Amino acid sequence: MAVQAGKTSVCEFESRYDLRGADRVIVDGEGIVGTVVPPKEKAGTKTPITRLAIRFETKADALPGMRDVRLIHAARSIDAGQIVVVRDPIIVETLNNDTMKTAQKIPLPAAVCGALEKAEDVDFFEFEVKAGTALTFT
């Protein structure tokens, strides 16, 4: 998951454990504040909450790079994962980009946020650059 410096983003965390009661977010480093988006629950149900949305407000001067994120629950700390802070606009991978023919077109500059959808997942992306342009992949 990625967040862009100077923007507000909502990312969804998924866990095999019940996230019910998680009410605070701690993000390592400076320049990012995370808040839990209260889940919509049906009245009277106690179904485990395994997906939780987090709103990240990222300052324009937040340093790029990986950040650890922890969800705080009244009874325990829940290590939720990591996010990466980027400067460029975020492009989320489409699901139908598994062949050269269906390559996802990416406008540059961009930070591509992808996922492994299956074993040995291969994804294709297409972009245009002028000769002599330096590209950075991280």
Image (spheres, rainbow, N blue to C red):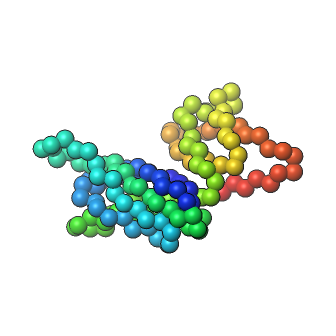
Who's the residue at 87% across and 51% down the image? 132
Image coordinates of residue 67 in percent, x first then y, are 50, 65
Specify whether residue 67 is in view.
no
Say if 44 sits above or below 70 in the image. above
**Which residue lies at the image location 66% right of the left edge and 33% below the top edge?**
103
Quick check: can you spot residue 105?
A: yes
Task: Kindly identify the residue that appears in the image at 50 percent across and 62 percent down.
Answer: 58
Q: Residue furthest top?
A: 101
Question: Residue 72's spot in the image, x, y percent?
Answer: 31, 66
**Residue that extends furthest to the right in the rendered view of this protein:** 131
Residue 66 screen position, x and y as percent = 55, 64
Relative vertical location of residue 28 with respect to residue 12 in this rendering, above or below: below
Residue 17: image location, x then y, percent: 29, 54
Q: What residue sits 64% from the left and 35% below the top?
A: 104
Q: Quadrant of residue 20?
A: bottom left
Residue at the farthest bottom position: 29
Give the quadrant of residue 81.
bottom left
- Which quarter of the figure has residue 128? top right
- State which quarter of the image contains the C terminus: bottom right
How many dots with numbers?
0
- Above or below, 1 relative to 25: above
